[in-house]
Image (spheres, rainbow, N blue to C red):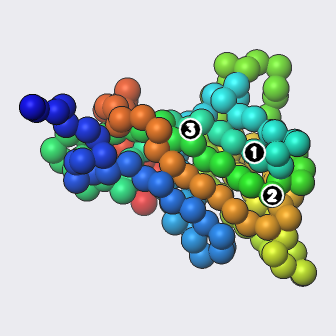
């Protein structure tokens, strides 16, 4: 009996990462740089103290771009222990608005493990999360797909 190949069996396996320390968060921040997220794909689940985003992230970690071109993949970016969420420079009037993540940074409180996490967005926007403790997960949930532009984001560096 033959079985179809699965994405998980390939060399380029889906990501499933967590961050409990600021140093770990730097890895996740690098992986979600240039991820795009429709405003309608963000949720603050106040009762569960969770903020979740379904992002279309560029596969920076993939060394296979020369073989198959630039790719994106849908991923869940989930923040736990969220006490509050605030936005700056983001209009919630149009749920079709597309945002682009530039970085994810955490500043611990004077009394850890709490602190403030900031998702910096292109166009001077930001989302600030007040956290009781740092706990972040990034998990790919679809197969990679060819980036619509066919190119990697370019920051001129």
Estimate the spatial distance between the alpha carbons at disc 1 and disc 3, rounded to whole Å.
Answer: 13 Å
- Classify residue 110 as left or right of residue 147: right
Instruction: Name the residue rendered at 71%, 53% in the picture.
Output: 79
Element class at badge 3: strand
Instruction: Name the residue rendered at 39%, 53% in the picture.
Output: 60
Residue assigned mark 1:
51
- Classify residue 57 as left or right of residue 117: left
Residue 115 visible, this angle: no
| Label 1 CA crowd tier, 10 Å (few <14, some 14–19, many 20+) | many
Estimate the spatial distance between the alpha carbons at disc 2 and disc 3, rounded to whole Å.
Answer: 20 Å
Q: Nearer the viewer, residue 85 or 93?
A: 85
x and y, in percent, of residue 41 in the image: 66, 29
Observer-side mark, 1 or 3, equals 1
Observer-side mark, 2 or 3, equals 2
Instruction: Name the residue rendered at 42%, 34% in the picture.
Output: 142
The quarter of the rendered structure image containing the C terminus is bottom left
Of the numbered discs 2 and 3, the one sitting upstream in the chain is: 3
Element class at badge 2: loop
x and y, in percent, of residue 150 in the image: 31, 32
- Compared with 112, 157 (above or below) is above
Q: Are marks 1 and 3 in contact (CB under 8 Å)?
A: no
The quarter of the rendered structure image containing the N terminus is top left
Residue assigned mark 2:
81
Of the numbered discs 1 and 2, the one sitting upstream in the chain is: 1
| Label 3 CA crowd tier, 10 Å (few <14, some 14–19, many 20+) | many
Residue assigned mark 3:
55
Residue 38 visible, this angle: yes
x and y, in percent, of residue 122 in the image: 64, 43
């Amino acid at each position: 009996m033959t079985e179809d190949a699965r994405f998980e069996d390939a060399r380029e396996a889906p990501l499933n990462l967590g961050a409990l320390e600021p140093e770990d968060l730097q890895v996740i921040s690098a992986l979600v740089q240039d991820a795009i997220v429709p405003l309608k794909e963000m949720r603050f689940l106040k009762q569960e103290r969770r903020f979740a985003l379904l992002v279309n992230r560029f596969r920076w970690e993939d060394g296979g771009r020369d073989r198959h071109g630039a790719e994106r993949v849908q991923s869940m970016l989930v923040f736990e222990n969220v006490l509050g969420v605030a936005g700056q420079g983001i209009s919630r009037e149009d749920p079709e608005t597309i945002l682009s993540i530039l970085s994810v940074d955490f500043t611990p409180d004077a009394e850890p493990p709490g602190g403030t996490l900031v998702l910096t967005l292109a166009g001077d926007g930001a989302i600030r999360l007040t956290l009781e403790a740092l706990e972040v997960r990034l998990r790919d949930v679809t197969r990679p797909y060819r980036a619509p532009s066919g190119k990697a984001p370019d920051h001129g560096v």
